[in-house]
Amino acid sequence: MSQAPGTGRGPVVTPVRVVIALCLVAPFVAMLWVGSYAKTDPVVIGIPFFYWYQMAWVLISTLLTMVAYKLWQRDQRARRAPKGGAAQ
């Protein structure tokens, strides 16, 4: 028995999907690398670096997740679109 075209393919790695992965992994790497932000200087409006760095990553993570989601939507639409040829 043969399969329908396109149903037996495995996962596809594309540049867009690599960017999506980087957007989702970056916050984890930034927060798990504690040595990079385990200090008090520089102080911003009286808040030590340790705290404002983590709060900044809350906002950065939100933006990166939004970018990853939009790229994923675009990638899925492109994969579902008919390939070539004129519509009849």
Image: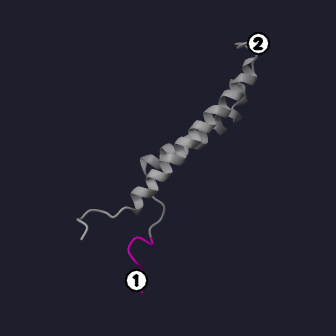
**Quadrant including the N terminus:** bottom left
Q: Establish if 7 lies above or below 13.
A: below
Q: Is residue 75 above or below residue 85?
A: above
In the picture, the disc for residue 60 is none
Residue 3: % across, % down = 42, 79
Asked if the stretch drawn in magenta spans residue 65, the answer is no
Measured from the top left, where is residue 20 in percent x and y? 52, 45
Give the residue number, with chain letter if any, for mark 2: 46
The answer to whether residue 13 is seen in the rendering is no
- Which residue does the image show at 76% across and 12% down from the upper left? 46
Q: Which residue is mark 1?
A: 2
Task: Indicate the secondary structure of the residue bearing disc 1.
Answer: loop
**Disc 2, SS:** loop
Q: In this picture, is 2 found above or below 77?
A: below
**Side of 8 where 65 appears, left or right:** right
| Residue 42 vs residue 76, the one in the foreground | 76
Q: Name the chief secondary structure element in magenta.
A: loop
Specify the color scheme. one colour
Q: Amino acid at mark 2?
A: Gly
Q: Nearer the viewer, residue 48 or 15?
A: 48
Q: Residues within 10 Å of mark 2 (few under 14, many from 20)?
A: few
Relative image position of residue 11 (x, y in whole percent): 48, 61
Relative side of 81 to 18, left or right: left
Write down the region rendered in magenta: 1-8
